[in-house]
Image: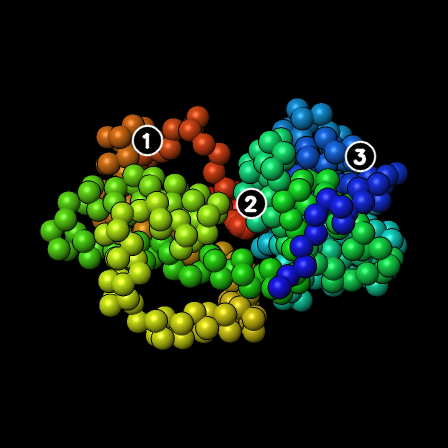
Amino acid sequence: MARIYRDDDADISRLDGRTVAILGYGNQGRSQGLNLRDSGVAVIVGSPSDSSAESALKDGFAVSRIGEAVRQSDVQLFLVPDEVMGEVYGEEVGPNLEPGSALCFASGYNVAYGLLSFPETIDVMLLAPRMVGKGVRDTFLSGIGFPSLLAVEQDATGDAWGTVLALARGIGSTRMGALKSSFMEEAVVDLFSEQRGDLLLLRLMFEALTEAGIDPDVAILELYGSGEWVEIYAAARDMGMWPQLQLHSHTSQYGQYIAGQRYIDAERSKTSLKRLIDDLQSGSFARAWQDEYRAGMPTLQAAMTTTRHHPLQEAEDRLYAELGRREPDSDSGRDRPRAAETETETETETETETETLSPGAER
């Protein structure tokens, strides 16, 4: 069982007299920076001169280029996208790190796969919230907190664990519980959750239902469009995945426990999932993704184009416009989400968002 750290295990005074730099002011960067400042920590922001820098200035932070922020700080929260992290580290972060610096990541990806190298004189740590950026801020303000994964890759000062625990307390994670993990473990579970095929399976379900004569609008509402799964997953979060079934009808319970087994080949599915894990642990996926990114992401762009023209997407656009969830986009002829509805975020992971694709994401 993983070690769980809470407020009593973390001494935020270890950050007294130290300046923390938020490197990348996306959804995660903003929330973590605001939480740390509210916890009494001295925070500055390192960002390119773009809209994220303007946001940080409006929030009252001192903002400079990333390299300058590294030079001015003792602790750095490195919150830029995985695919550009190597370039940013090589050009702006690495050359400006002083001995005794504490470099903290929110994603295990680049460290787990050996894509970065560090001087032996710095601490290298992981503080990976299992919560979207907006939730990091909202649960801090509500006093609930959120879970995170913690790890130390390199402990040059002998106090890396003290520092990462202080950061976890400062952003509000030890209120609920921060679990001891590793960079590789975080990378594997994060990537696994992104590649397990949920969206593809939903698309297959849509195809099967519509090919059987079910109206596309009805299929979409049942599969995800009604929002019922938001409530189901909220109940699973609070009660547990199987215990939440007590909120369902007996017919639903019979279907989940018994009938559904007839259509799932458990051994074949588990074999496929193990192959996925092998690809992640071996670095095979990381190498493929690096090659794809360097080539300009042609395969990803082609898949996104194909998806935009799939019958599921066309039916969804039409239905969501009818339901008032989208309004016509006069430029493209497609629907776009109503801007005031919600703040969205893609990672996991981990995932401080910026646009590197259309859309892209920081982790």
Residue found at x 54% / y 57%: 190
Q: Which numbered disc, 3 or 2, marks the residue that appears first in the sequence? A: 3
Give the residue number, with chain letter if any, for mark 1. 326
Q: Position of residue 71 (x, y in %)?
A: 83, 44
For residue 259, above or below residue 12: below
Q: Would you say 260 lies left or right of 11 here? A: left
The label nearer to you, 3 versus 2, is: 2
**Mark 1: secondary structure:** strand
Q: CA distance from mark 1 to mark 2?
A: 26 Å
Q: Would you say 217 lies left or right of 69 here? A: left
Q: Position of residue 50 (x, y in %)?
A: 62, 34
Q: Residue furthest left?
A: 213
Q: CA distance from mark 3 to mark 2?
A: 23 Å
The mark found on residue 42 in the picture is 3
Q: How is the image coloured?
A: rainbow
User: What type is the residue that disc 2 sits on?
Assistant: Met
Q: CA distance from mark 1 to mark 3?
A: 41 Å
For residue 150, above or below residue 316: below
Q: Quadrant of residue 197?
A: bottom left
**Mark 2: secondary structure:** loop
Closer to the camera, 305 or 62?
62
Image quarter where the N terminus lies is bottom right
Sort mark 1 into few (<14), some (14-19) or many (20+) by Cα contacts within 10 Å.
Answer: some
Residue found at x 15% / y 45%: 215
User: What type is the residue that disc 1 sits on?
Assistant: Arg
Sort mark 3 into few (<14), some (14-19) or many (20+) by Cα contacts within 10 Å.
Answer: some
Q: How many marks?
A: 3
Residue found at x 43% / y 44%: 235
Q: Would you say 11 lies left or right of 309 here? A: right
Give the residue number, with chain letter if any, for mark 2. 131
